[in-house]
Structure formats: structure tokens, C-alpha cells
């Protein structure tokens, strides 16, 4: 399928804030849970397309620590959806490895068990890794990393003067993968919502009005095209980046 993308510049890691499920359902006179069910279908579409495009890591913001403040019936529906969606054969069909990040201890036991089972079952899959951020927040993650580092200093296995950016990155839940090159948020909101705050320091941000249940392959292509039309400078000048690019091609 010709999608008009430069296949040599596909982001290695795409992170998505899947927003708009509830508003999608409300606009149709449905309960919010129907929006979350349709959101699962969007996950299947985007996962399949990301594997086809050659994305190595896809990280999906599924449930934040702040979401525990939502009504009990909505939380119960979401936890039930986690269980049923993990039974999907999409992981094996697309050779996708499953990983989860977040404060997993807060989740119901049945959900925790299913998450571990899915991680183990897909551990040898290699085409792409899907990472689900569940009961996750960046502030929780960074605080947790700080506690681990402080404990190592206390035990004498790490000296305070040795602490650097790499030390912090190594203690985050995302230690096993590179930072996202592209962060997508659906649903029209223009905020990060406590998601991967350390990791997206130099990610390209893409916001769209499309509610997550309606987010499809073409919407994904639009986001990637936007990414490919940008110059990633990492604090350097445009001229520096262009000179480095020319030098690398010689």
C-alpha cells in the first residue's frame, strides 16, 4: 500500500495518548464504556499498521494513575476490557511482544495475572514491542526512580556524584527502549497529561481532533508525514543540522 511516507524515516518509537473514547460515545448517545470498546478496535488497527511500517516500539497510554478517580463502574469496565483485549491474537499474528509499565500493584489480581501471562507468552516475538502504560503517570515514575537511586546511594552501591541523566533513565520503567521520536495525542486536547515527561524531552508532538475510536491508518500516516516534514535539531541550529547531514552523506 502506497501511503506517501518516506520509509527510511519511520519513527522507531511512537507514543500515543489515546484520548476521546468517552466523548466519541457521548456524541452517539452511548455510555462511555462503548467508546472504550471501540477504542480497542483502534488499537488493533494501529498496532497492525505500525508493524507493517516497521515501527519498533508503540507505547499506548491506556490508564493513568489519575484515572483511578473516575466512577467505579467506568473503572470496572476498563479493567474488564484490559482482560478481554489481551486475549486478542493480534500479538501472535503480528509477531508483537507485549510489555506493561506503571504502578501494576494497584491493579486487580486477575488483571495483573493476565498482564504477566501475556508478557511471558509473547516474550519471543520480535517484529515490534507494544508497551501499555497502565496505572501510569510520569510523576509517579520519576518519583519511584528517585527512591531507587536514593536507596542505592544509601547502600553505597552508587555515589551521589555519579548520578547523571543516564542514571535516571536506567531507573525508569522504560529503561528497555529508546525515547519516543513521535508523540501523538488524539481527541483535540493540547496537553501531555503526565505522560512520559522525561522521555519526550525532544520528541516531536502531534495533536489531532480525531477521537481515538476513529483514528485509523490514514490518520497515523498524517502524523508520521508531519514528523517527517520537521527538522529535528536537539538544540542545534538549522545550519548545523544541515551541515552534519551533508557530511554524513559524503
Image (spheres, rainbow, N blue to C red):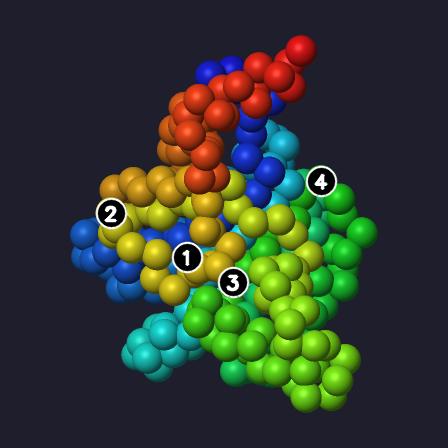
Q: x and y percent of residue 51 in the render?
A: 62, 36
Query: Which numbered disc, 2 or 4, marks the residue that appears first in the sequence?
Result: 4
**Helix, strand or loop under label 3:** strand
Q: Which residue is mark 2?
A: 188
Q: Look at the image and tell me in which quarter the C terminus lies.
A: top right
Given this view, does label 2 or label 1 mark the residue nearer the observer?
Answer: 2
| Residue at 29%, 55% in the rendered image | 191
Q: x and y percent of residue 39 in the render?
A: 41, 52
**Helix, strand or loop under label 4:** loop
Whether residue 216 sits left or right of residue 249 in the image: it is left
Q: Callout 1 environment at 10 Å: few (<14), some (14 to 19), or many (20+)?
A: some
Is the Cβ of the residue at disc 3 closer than 8 Å to that at disc 1? no
| Residue at 31%, 76% in the rendered image | 70
Q: Which residue is mark 4?
A: 127
**Helix, strand or loop under label 2:** loop
Query: Which numbered disc, 3 or 2, marks the residue that appears first in the sequence?
Result: 3
Query: Which numbered disc, 3 or 1, marks the residue that appears first in the sequence?
Result: 1
The answer, for residue 80, to whether it is visible in the render is no
Q: x and y percent of residue 134 in the render?
A: 51, 67
Tell me the tag on residue 133. 3
Whether residue 79 sits left or right of residue 116 in the image: it is left
In front here: 26 or 172? Answer: 172
Q: Which residue is mark 1?
A: 37
Q: Outermost residue toward the bottom?
A: 154
Amino acid at each position: 500500500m502506497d501511503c506517501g511516507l518516506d520509509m527510511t524515516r519511520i519513527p522507531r518509537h511512537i507514543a500515543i495518548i489515546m484520548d476521546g473514547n468517552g466523548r466519541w460515545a457521548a456524541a452517539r448517545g452511548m455510555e462511555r464504556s462503548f467508546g472504550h470498546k471501540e477504542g480497542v478496535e483502534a488499537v488493533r488497527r494501529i498496532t497492525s499498521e505500525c508493524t507493517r511500517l516497521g515501527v519498533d516500539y508503540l507505547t499506548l497510554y491506556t490508564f493513568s494513575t489519575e484515572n483511578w478517580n473516575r466512577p467505579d463502574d467506568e473503572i470496572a469496565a476498563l479493567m474488564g476490557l484490559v482482560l478481554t483485549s489481551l486475549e486478542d491474537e493480534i500479538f501472535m499474528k503480528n509477531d508483537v511482544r507485549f510489555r506493561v509499565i506503571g504502578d501494576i500493584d494497584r491493579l486487580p489480581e486477575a488483571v495483573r495475572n493476565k498482564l504477566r501471562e501475556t508478557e511471558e507468552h509473547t516474550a519471543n516475538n520480535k517484529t515490534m514491542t507494544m508497551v501499555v502504560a497502565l496505572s501510569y503517570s510520569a510523576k509517579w515514575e520519576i518519583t519511584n526512580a528517585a527512591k531507587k537511586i536514593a536507596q542505592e546511594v544509601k547502600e553505597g552501591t552508587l555515589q551521589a556524584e555519579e548520578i547523571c541523566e543516564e542514571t535516571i533513565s536506567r531507573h525508569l520503567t522504560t529503561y528497555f527502549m529508546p525515547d519516543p521520536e513521535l508523540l501523538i495525542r488524539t481527541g483535540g486536547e493540547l496537553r501531555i497529561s503526565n505522560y512520559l515527561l522525561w522521555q519526550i524531552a525532544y520528541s516531536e508532538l502531534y495533536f489531532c481532533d480525531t477521537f481515538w475510536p476513529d483514528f485509523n491508518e490514514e490518520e497515523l500516516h498524517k502524523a508520521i508525514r508531519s514528523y517527517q516534514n520537521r527538522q529535528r535539531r536537539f538544540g542545534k541550529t538549522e545550519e548545523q543540522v544541515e551541515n552534519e547531514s551533508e557530511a554524513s552523506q559524503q
